[in-house]
Image (tube, rainbow, N blue to C red):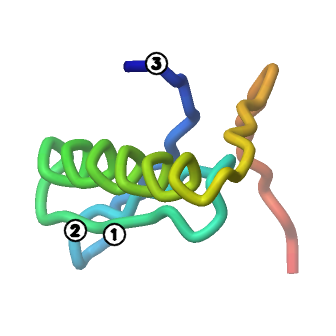
Amino acid sequence: MAGYRFSVIIEKDINGYFAFCPELQGCYTQGNTYEEVLENIKDAIRLHVEDRIESGEEISQAESISLTSLEVAV
């Protein structure tokens, strides 16, 4: 069993938590708690990677990740 490391973005809003994996297009999920969304995104990533492997697709991984927030005046 191969191991992979992916970045995950988790956002909180009034409806709960939303998580996505930027390296895997279309890989996202939601949950009511932080712990729930973390487990959900692990499952989503695993299923996404298994599907790509079965389809013979490449599993790309980012070499580095930078996260920042910006204030934009409008």
Residue 46 % position (x, y):
37, 45
Q: Which residue is mark 1?
A: 13
**How far is the residue under mark 2 from the one under mark 1?**
6 Å
Tell me what residue is drawn at x 36 percent, y 54 percent: 47
Q: Which of disc 2 and disc 3 is earlier in sequence?
A: 3
- Mark 3 burial class by Cα count in 10 Å: few <14, some 14-19, many 20+: few
Q: Are marks 2 and 1 in contact (CB under 8 Å)?
A: yes
Q: Is residue 5 above or below residue 49?
A: above
Q: Which of disc 3 and disc 1 is earlier in sequence?
A: 3
Q: Are marks 3 and 2 in contact (CB under 8 Å)?
A: no
Q: Amino acid at mark 1?
A: Asp
- As drawn, the label of residue 16 is 2
**How far is the residue under mark 1 from the one under mark 3?**
31 Å
Q: On the picture, is 52 further left or further right than 50? A: right
Q: Amino acid at mark 2?
A: Gly
Q: Quadrant of the N terminus?
A: top left
Q: Which residue is mark 3?
A: 3
Label 1 SS: strand
- Mark 2 burial class by Cα count in 10 Å: few <14, some 14-19, many 20+: some
Q: Quadrant of the C terminus?
A: bottom right
